[in-house]
Image (spheres, rainbow, N blue to C red):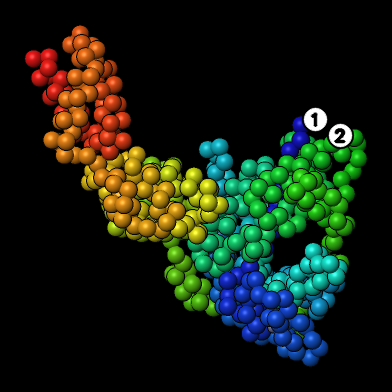
Amino acid sequence: MEYEMVIGMEIHVELGTKTKIFCSCPTEFGQDENTHTCPVCLGMPGVLPVLNEKVVEYATRAGLALNCEIAHFSKMDRKNYFYPDLPKAYQTSQFDLPICTGGVVEIEVDGMKKDIGITRIHIEEDAGKLLHESAEGTLVDVNRCGVPLVEIVTEPDMRSAEEARVFAEKVRNILEYTGVSDCKMQEGSMRFDVNLSMREKGATVLGTRTEMKNLNSFRALVRAVQYESKRQIIELKKGHKIIQETRKWDDTKGVSSSLRSKEEAQDYRYFPEPDLVPIVIEKEYIEKIKSELPELPEAKKQRYIDEYKLPEYDAGVLTASGVTARFFEEAVSLYDEAKQISNWIMVEIPPLLKEKELTMENIPIKPAQLAELLKLVKDGVINGTSGKEVLKEMFNSGKNPDEIVKEQGLSQVSDTGELEAIIEKIVADNPKSLEDIGAGNEKAYGFLTGQVMKATKGKANPQVANKIIRDVVAKHLG
Ligand SMILES: [Zn+2]
């Protein structure tokens, strides 16, 4: 029997507001444990939460960027459950009336375009964190309690690990562009839950699904999907039923294990939050947020193709992250050779970043420095090979390209007198090449150019050198 994978996703995204969702505690990551708390985010009896207006703004912006409808009227609800990292014993979330519904994101896998439906986006508060690594046992840090989140819930529209990855990357990219979150997965700002079931190919009814929670990298997402789909197929082939449950993915071991049986909505005993007024959003407000949306990845990609005449591939790579796009745009504003800049960003920079375990987010060179380097190459001050060396040194020392060129004496030898002397000697030392050229073998020119490069340690200006070689050879052959 042939099986088909069905995947839906829930994506939790921490919003980049300065303060928490219902109190004025700061949201900063990486502070001392339990220092950013107050009676409100600890859920002490008798406190009154106040909704942070920025949360509504950011959720609206995210919803519009993901092509959702924004609700005129929505409300907050209590989702009851007990976790040691949630002192309130309920999470303030949204149940039946979320702030956004009915969005869509187009993805492309293997040249095929496909729409992935967004069922809803709701706003809620994050829980704290359990720290298991302490010698004293498990400790709890509640700094994260009350950090605002949006939860993006998709339709079960994905059919492969690749589709899931492309979708997840695209959502991250769009949200990063809108500025509602830093989307840093390593800091938990963006986490993926994957609902996965298998069914006979062609069937219309969905199989029983399992949920894998808190996947925090694209790699973990892909591996978890591959593992879980295989596990379910094995179970089904044995004639076993899939148990609806929450599973924990262990990325180090590459396996998933059962965590708990999956709760249904009724298990949470949702009820309207009595301490918060409903959220009413006027049409004008939505229009205003819409008009302020920045250029999103798709539009930017098209503009790069139209305005900078870049190939679609380049435009796709450069716009795949907001950080890279900004770097490119700044460089191109200073040096008007889009394709050359694109090549260096796509080909020369990534291996240097990798070597230093950096990303475009903390790249040690500035767009202006890259522009300056490429000008030196274009003007013939240095050749392309030296340019790559200079870039490497820029990564190491942070110095400007012209400084490095001076220090290392990398300027090209374009001085015709100096080159003529070198070439005369090379031609005299290689009578065989002269003979070959005389016999019509043009390849011997390549050999001579190679010798010139060797003699000048790669610094000869190739155009100037080639012209002199031809002149000198012509003179000898008379
Ligand atoms: Zn607080």
Q: Secondary structure at mark 1?
A: loop
Q: Nearer the viewer, residue 158 or 444?
A: 444
Residue type for callout 1: Met
Whether the residue carrying mark 2 lies under 8 Å from ligand 1 is answered with no
Quarter of the figure that contains the C terminus = top left
**Image marks 1 and 2: residues in contact by CB distance under 8 Å:** yes
Residue at image location 58% in from the left, 56% down from the top:
171
Local crowd size for mark 2, using a 10 Å CA cut-off: few (<14), some (14–19), many (≥20) = few
Q: Kindly identify which residue carries mark 2.
A: 237
Asked whether, in this view, residue 65 is left or right of residue 187, the answer is: left
Residue 122, percent across and down? 66, 68
Asked whether, in this view, residue 44 is left or right of residue 177, the answer is: right
Place residue 40 in its image quadrant.
bottom right
Quarter of the figure that contains the N terminus = top right
Q: Kindly identify which residue carries mark 1.
A: 1
Place residue 28 in its image quadrant.
bottom right
Mark 1 vs mark 2, CA separation in Å: 9 Å
Whether the residue carrying mark 1 lies under 8 Å from ligand 1 is answered with no
Q: Nearer the viewer, mark 1 or mark 2?
A: 2
Residue 39, percent across and down? 75, 87
**View extreme (top): residue:** 439
* Residue 267's disc number: none
* Residue 405 to residue 232: above or below: below
* Residue 175 to residue 222: above or below: below
Residue type for callout 2: Lys
**View extreme (bottom): residue:** 46
Residue at image location 31% in from the left, 35% down from the top:
457
* Residue 360 in view of the camera: yes
